[in-house]
Image (spheres, coloured by chain):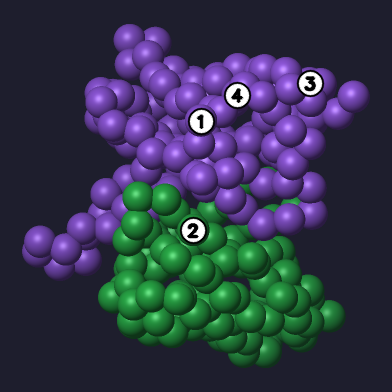
Chain colours: A purple, B green
Amino acid sequence: EVQLVESGGGLVQPGGSRRLSCIGSGFTFSTSWMSWVRQAPGKGLEWVANIKQEGSETNYADSVKGRFIISRDNTNNSLFLQMNSLRAEDTAVYYCAREDQVTTRPSYYYYVLAVWGQGTTVTVSS
Amino acid sequence: IQMTQSPSSLSASVGDRVTISCRTSQRISDYLNWYQQKPGKAPKLLIYAASTLQSGVPSRFSGSGSGTDFTLTISNVQPEDFGSYFCQESVSNGYTFGRGTKLEIK
């Protein structure tokens, strides 16, 4: 069974740090781009960051750039999100997601968030 | 890329046909995905490339559009279709989502 399981959430003080983890199973982890997506309480989805298969390329949302670092360990099928200088507005459920490349016709490729974990909750509060 | 999704909420009866709109601030061809999210659960991919149904998704779901205007249609709404629906562009390095549409079944 294809599965993603996040961990590491909890209560953090403003200005503090937290490291989230996500372990993949049931698929070849090292061949997939991976993303983090978050959802503040009662709000919509916000893409946070993603990382290429071997970790050589990363992208970040402007809201977390310079504060969060995405990384991966393909040996252990693991994805990480190091969150620093946390703010109240970072309070959210954080999901890891596998990005799949799909096609509808030759030479046309699309990226989708095809597999999601169950999420881990981060609360930033004093 | 800015995403404008409407309506923010709607209520429908079983058997109704509902449409959800998503408009982008730039032309994105058909790089548009739709997700369904049930309360307390992770999102689930419904449609990609604006109109291609993900495997296992019921055929009452359909998508259309290209450029800047897109539509998700649910024909013959079923009780299990309650939840929130999000559009998402996949043309940029950062995947922007719409703000969501909450569907309630009467």
Task: Give the numbered dot on residue B82.
Answer: none
Same subunit, labels 3 and 2: the answer reads: no
Q: Is residue B75 above or below residue A111?
A: below
Structural distance between the alpha carbons of marks 3 and 1: 19 Å
| Amino acid type indicated by mark 3 | Val
**Residue occupying image coordinates x 53% and y 60%:** B97
- Mark 4 vs 3, N-terminal side: 3
Q: Quadrant of residue A57?
A: top left
Residue A124 lies, in percent from the top left, at: 79, 29
Crowd tier of the residue under label 3, counting other residues whose Cα lies within 10 Å: few below 14, some 14–19, many 20 or above:
some
The residue tagged with tag 2: helix, strand or loop?
loop
User: Which residue is labeled 3 in the image?
Assistant: A12
Q: Secondary structure at mark 1?
A: loop
Which residue is tagged 2? B96
In this view, the mark in front (4 or 1): 1
- Quarter of the rendering occupied by the N terminus of chain B: bottom left
Q: Is residue A2 above or below residue B74?
A: above
Q: Label 4's element? A: strand
Vertical position of residue B97 compared to residue A5: above or below: below
Specify whether B105 is left or right of B3.
right
Disc 2 packing (10 Å; few <14; some 14–19; many ≥20) = many
The residue under label 1 is: A66
Amino acid tagged 2: Thr
Left or right, residue B64 beside residue A125: left
Question: Badge 1: how crowded within 10 Å, few (<14), some, or many (20+)?
Answer: few
**Chain containing the residue with disc 3:** A
